[in-house]
Image (cartoon, rainbow, N blue to C red):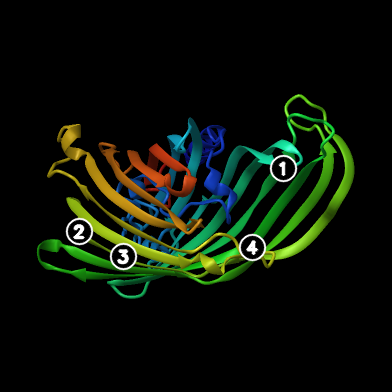
Amino acid sequence: MKKNKLGLLVGLVFLAVSLNAQDINSPFSRFGLGRLYGEGVSTQQQSMGGIGLGFTDPFTINPSNPASYANFVSKSFVFQTGIIADFGSLSTTQNSQSYNYMTLGHVEIGFPVTNWWRSSFGVLPYSKTGYDILDNFNVSGFGNMTSERWGQGGLTRIYWGNGFKITKNLRVGVNVSYLFGNTRYYNIVYSPDSLEVFGTKTEQYLKVGNLLYDWGLQYDIHLKKGRVITLGAVYSNKVNVSANRYWLATSLTGGYGSTPADVRDTIQYVPSENGKLLIPAHYGIGFTYTQPGHWLVGADIDWQNWSQFRSFGQSDSLQQSFTIAVGGEYTPTHTTISRLGKRMSYRLGMRYQQSYLSLYGTSINEFAVTGGVKFPFKRNPSNLNVGFEIGSHGTLQNNLVKDGFFNLSFGINIVDLTWFIKPKYR
């Protein structure tokens, strides 16, 4: 029986991975570490604006605050995964371009260790880079020139999380993550009108790997009628991530479209260079106010001073970022034999983010409205989740780019309350 359960989980993981076939398309991802993903990537949390610092549920894995693991039900086993489908349009004052992609959101498991210790393992995206930018301009004495920039890759984190119940109402936790991944950057400047004008091509391959630590705390305040206020806080310390890069710059003719490249000279070649990426400290506080099993409302705020970011000693066009998220969930009063509509949970939320990117003195901000529903299994805490986000990222000011998006997410939580119970009879 256990082999069948493990086979099912492995099959679901491979099914999700097989759908991770496309990359993002965002010109903003060429800066810093690319497009960042928070820990609240589950469909449940995304549907509620991304709240998670004060959120805890015995059948949901919430890596946003590792203290939440301490509320897993004894002898239970939770498997959680999800897929994100992103549809959007990139616009400037002159042009627009649509895009779409589908990607694996997360894969996580959670389980008890002792009466006071719960644990979780998972794989989460940390950042993604994906862009292909073509720019035409004129240079006096050379004529028309074209610049093409291309980047692809990203960072992933594998975490081991632990939550500890200190008292009836106080929980603490820590996520120990290994951050790894690689990104390729490519840039070529050439004359589309003449092979007699040398172009310049640069290629860079960046590979990173390091440990990260996230600390969390939650405290419950019990009120009348069974209602609970949960306060949450998280902290991630500043870390210097080990990195290695390859760098090659050449002069050439051709090398674009169907024109073959003819390298004329090597300008710079660095086969291997070790360095550091400085990721600044992260802080967050939040709360939820809930009537367990019926409704929940909450809010989060977190911030991170990305102006401290350094890549091989160099800064970027980054600033302090902060996010404000509010959201909630409502489940009608029901019994186990009620029709599906009464057993479902309905979610709404909103998120505003001043991102870490600032160009030409303009912050690249994001705003989104979110929502979703949970479809519960009839005689088991397992459930299916569907969520959406509608919003925009960026601005048309100062000839910048605006990204209008509609995201769909699909998640599944499989809960086994007998995973660690050994049957007496076979």
Q: Position of residue 249 (x, y in %)?
A: 80, 48
The kind of residue on which mark 1 rests is Ser
Q: Position of residue 57 (x, y in %)?
A: 31, 55
Which of the marked residues, 4 or 1, is nearer the chain's N terminus? 1
Q: Nearer the viewer, mark 4 or mark 2?
A: 4
The kind of residue on which mark 3 rests is Gly
Q: Position of residue 155 (x, y in %)?
A: 59, 51
Q: Position of residue 187 (x, y in %)?
A: 70, 43
The residue carrying mark 3 is 286
Kindly indicate the quadrant of the structure image that contains residue 311. bottom right
Circle 4: element type: strand
For the residue pair 370 and 27, the one nearer the viewer reads as 27
As drawn, the label of residue 210 is: 4
Q: Nearer the viewer, mark 4 or mark 1?
A: 1
The kind of residue on which mark 2 rests is Thr
Q: Nearer the viewer, mark 2 or mark 1?
A: 1
Q: Of all residues shown, which one is farthest toward the bottom? A: 167
As drawn, the label of residue 140 is: 1
Measure how far apart labels 4 and 1 are at the Cα level: 46 Å
For the residue pair 26 and 126, the one nearer the viewer reads as 26
